Image: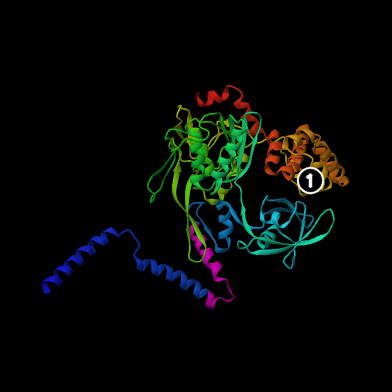
Amino acid sequence: MPLLFAVILIAGMVLGFNLRDTLRKKRDIQTVIERNDRLEQLIDLISEKYVDTVNTNLLYEDAIRGILSHLDPHTVYITASEYDEVNEDLEGGFFGIGVEFSIIRDTIQVTSVIPQGPAERAGVGLGDQLIKVGDSVVAGTGITSERIIGMLKGKQYSRVLVTLKEPSSGEFKQVAIKRDIVPLYSVDASIMLDSITGFIKINRFAATTYEEFEKAMKGLKAHGMKQLILDVRQNPGGYLDAATNIADDFIDDEKLLVYTLGKSSPRRDYKANRQGIFEKGKLAILVDESSASASEILAGAVQDWDRGVIVGRRTYGKGLVQEQYDMDDGSGLRLTVAKYYTPSGRSIQRSFAKGKEAYAADFAHRFETGELTGTDTTNEGDTSIYYTSSKRPVYGGGGIKPDIYVPYDTARLSSGVFNVTFSDNVRNFVWDYFMHHRSELMNYKTIAQYQAGFDAAVLVERYVAGLNQQMRRSTQAILTNAASAQYFRQHLKAQLARILFQNNGYYSVQTKSDNVVQRALETFYNRKYSALINR
């Protein structure tokens, strides 16, 4: 027995010394406990002794944000109250009644009803006015979209009683609606721009995006699509897999699409691994300064393999990968765990060395330097040179630089034109016009019929005539510019098309005056496309 104890004691000492060397640079459990105790002790002391009552939950949240302030701009804390809403966009749906609405003159107007959705099955129609939800009156001043959405959402198959006013008859009706899954589509539109050119607009990369994209592609190919414009402008990103699945449909032969690498995350390669739905045919990816993350992964892969052309303006510059971790209290942490690199080895992440405020102000900086308006196209982030498959130089360190640069159309989008075009007055006017001419507008059975048959000049005339004298003069002065007048007329027609034909109607009209879309079309039909990708 003494011999056995001696052997165990010696083995323990050897193991202890080895563990000490192995864990020398790691925090021991006592340090962790002490640090947690320090925070708990501080908050408990404030709660017990402070002169006024404080919300301890807010203190914890502020402490967490203080810790994260020392990390990158994309590591974020999600509170328990924000968690479900933050995840809805990426998961592709929520439980609700299936309507879209606008608050027009303090009245909630149903502007769209999802086909076969809970509201349509219960008898809710386009144009119905929402008066009450349950016993709560929701018409009148002070009502907000957030409050209405919160009241209409709920658990699946739960019931909500709503009181509606039918616009033509003025009669009230009570409708019980059983809540169900309401999809949040990430493919905004899929249309044919001409006999062979398809157009797809993706607003984010969610769990359902690839399924939506594949369905859109099959539909366009059935209509004769031979070349494609894919619009990811204003797309902030989302799931990496959604972007690589779409890239796989364009790129062939087990080629590398993107890879990720981090201090604690070993390199992981994402490669094309199946027969894609559109590996041949002309391709243009539209990007701008708000195209980020997964949008840049897709654009970077297409550019590096010379599979298509990138059209627009330099992208956002987010090359960091986040993983989401759920906390015990229902909150979450999106923690940056790696960087992603395009097939040529580029890191797209722009610098945040000057702090988060400077990082967030990048859009204003680009505007001030003239990068967005075409007066100066020098990109400060373009430092490291890489090469595409056909040896074209591309750059890292500040977003994806387009092959074909298209600046803002500042003449058309002056502050005056912008303020008039996107005002509440215009939105209310278009809706009122629809409601007053609903029967005749419903005679347009297709977007093509509407495009050819409806003259939007009548919209401009009636809008201007309905303004007060001062507003009429200023609006007429703005519309004396031919380009501004054309854009305003096109915008009114597109907004009305959205009511009639949803987003496909809007983009069918809007793309006619979209200078980035038109530039991509021009590239398809001249020699520049082949020259750029060396094919």
Which region is colored magenta?
A: 47-68
Residue 512, quarter of the rendered image: top right
Residue at 56%, 25% (x, y): give it.
529
The N terminus: image quadrant = bottom left
Left or right of 158? Residue 394 is left
Q: Helix, strand, or loop for circle 1?
A: helix
Residue 215, quarter of the rendered image: top right
Residue with the mark numbered 1: 430
Question: Residue 469 in magenta?
Answer: no
Residue at 44%, 46% (x, y): give it.
339
Residue at 57%, 51% (x, y): give it.
92
Q: Residues within 10 Å of mark 1 (few under 14, many from 20)?
A: some
Q: Position of residue 24 (x, y in %)?
A: 30, 60
Q: Residue furthest top?
A: 527
Majority secondary structure in the magenta region: helix
Left or right of 124? Residue 188 is left
Left or right of 402? Residue 476 is right
User: Which residue is nearer to you in this view: 358 or 473?
Assistant: 473
- Total labels drawn: 1
Q: Position of residue 372 (x, y in %)?
A: 62, 37
User: Which residue is nearer to you in this view: 371 or 142?
Assistant: 142
Q: Position of residue 494 (x, y in %)?
A: 73, 40
Task: Name which residue type carries label 1.
Answer: Val
